[in-house]
Image (cartoon, rainbow, N blue to C red):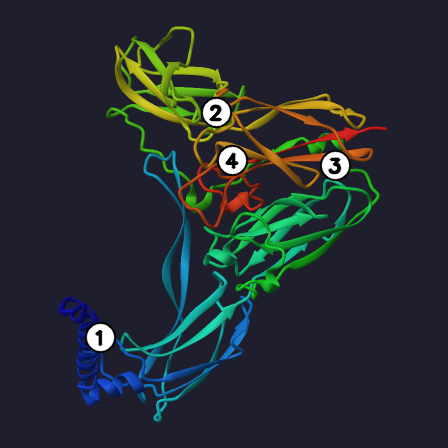
Amino acid sequence: MNILIKRMLQPLKVSLLIVLALMLLLSACSEASPQENADTAGNTGSSEQQGTAVQQGTMKLEPASGRIGSKVKATADGLVANEPFELIWHDDIGSYEIEENNYSYIGTKYTPAEKTILSAKADAEGRWNGEFDVPDGFGDDHDVVIKQDGKKVAQANYFVETFFKISPLSGPVGTEITIEGEGLSSKMYGSLWHLNYDNAYTGMITGVSTNGRAIGKMRATGKAGDHFITIEGGSSGFPYLNRAQSAINYIHTQYFTFTITDEEPVGGAEALVYTDPPKHAANGGIIMPPPNNKKGVAITLDKEEGIVGEPIVMTGSGLPRNEKLEIAWHTMVGNRVTAAGYGENTVPLASEEIMTDDKGEFRLPFDVPDDLGGLPHLIEVKVKGETYGEAYLKILPSIVEVSPQSGPPGTTFSIVIKGSGWTEYDNTYNVVYNNSNIGYICGFNSQGTITLPLVATGDPGYKLIDIYPGIYKGEEIQPNLYLRPQLTYIEDHPGTAIPTLRTYFEVTE
């Protein structure tokens, strides 16, 4: 019986202990100083007491949302009277992260940044009225802060809307359509957008390294008449179609119509086969280590990049006189799929013997090797096994054959590409047939050569094939940028500024 009573009393003891603990906690909370209570309720504590600047004024923005460049009226009070201040716009700087080895893609990165919009002075009553233009940058929510003597004294929020437009709005098959976007977000849900053409997925639109500004390219395809384009957000990798029922319903689908005119394709059929190399990659692109040249040695190429088979001339000076040269071409071999993996390899660049002259100079004409594109290849110039100088040559991807180039529906044809890349950001190309993304291709295992097999479909006429850069894989999970055609490749693709490859197939009766 005594054991039973003890077991019955045990929960009661625990309950009493809990009650006592709660009473002690409430007592501790009630002992806060009057000044601490005032700081919590009125936000009026000094920065010295808090250790950081404390907001003491208020600010209102009218309107509280709009586009880049919109006029905004601002009113503030509770500022330090008769003291100057700065109006600060909080934004981000976007970039793509790539490992130091230059091979591996990590993901997108956004670093907080402040922009001073204007400087002014509070009046004798601590008030200010003024206006400003919404600055260029990312969309979504932004803190707008007033700082006096380096301390935040007032703050408001402004929402920047994402806006797209296309141009032109009409033209024949093959017309290049430019998609311009502004105010893309640095936050996950509004940073990645997608384009559908006549309800077929075409590709993704980004503005990571261009700070919320997007410039995308595509070509008009289909029969004469109206064609319908939708642009929609979707951080998971595809358009999120019922956005209105989501928790992120402030992102809106944007609709456009392009009218194909009944004219010959732009520039004729021959002009439909070309590449479109961008001037630079996102954030300036990959920076290779400087060449390791001995003092006084110079190794130069007449071109820094070229397509497979393109003639190049290499010259050197400051080398030992009348000596035989070993010229080594560095490349990668293997793949990411098998257990053997991949690694670096070197082969002779020239089959014939190369000698320096009595001035220690040489000249070597050669054709761009049939090899991988992507990162520039290192060329080493050696004398008796010792490296004297180096140079880099980048191989650009190119279409070398389309066969056949016409035929009825059901015709099988192939596109041969040289110079495909191998890193995680240029290992794959993404194939778009008549503005419909149909899959991806890779040329690492085949040392840069891709043979793309396709089947002709659709009504008679020109069917355009656009092969866009994309990102193979990385560490970042969302937004999902992987294995998608990147329509904004011209300014916002990470790595090595690879081009979109463009060609066509003519479907006959």
SS of the residue under disc 4: loop
The local crowd at label 2, few if under 14, some if 14 to 19, many if 20 or more residues have their Cα within 10 Å, is many
Name, please, the residue furthest toward the right.
509
Q: Position of residue 503 (x, y in %)?
A: 67, 31
Report the front residue among 95 and 409: 409
Q: Which mark is residue 498?
A: 4
**Quarter containing the C terminus:** top right
Q: Which of the marked residues, 3 or 4, is nearer the chain's N terminus? A: 3
Kindly indicate the quadrant of the structure image that contains residue 432: top right
Q: Spatial distance from mark 4 to mark 2, Cα to Cα?
A: 15 Å
Q: Is residue 166 above or below residue 414?
A: below
Amino acid on which disc 2 is placed: Phe
Q: Which of the marked residues, 1 or 3, is nearer the chain's N terminus? A: 1
Q: Which of the marked residues, 4 or 2, is nearer the chain's N terminus? A: 2
Amino acid on which disc 1 is placed: Ser
Q: Which of the marked residues, 1 or 2, is nearer the chain's N terminus? A: 1
Q: Which residue is mark 1?
A: 15
Q: Which residue is mark 3?
A: 267
Amino acid on which disc 3 is placed: Gly
Q: Is residue 270 above or below residue 196?
A: above
SS of the residue under disc 1: helix
SS of the residue under disc 2: loop
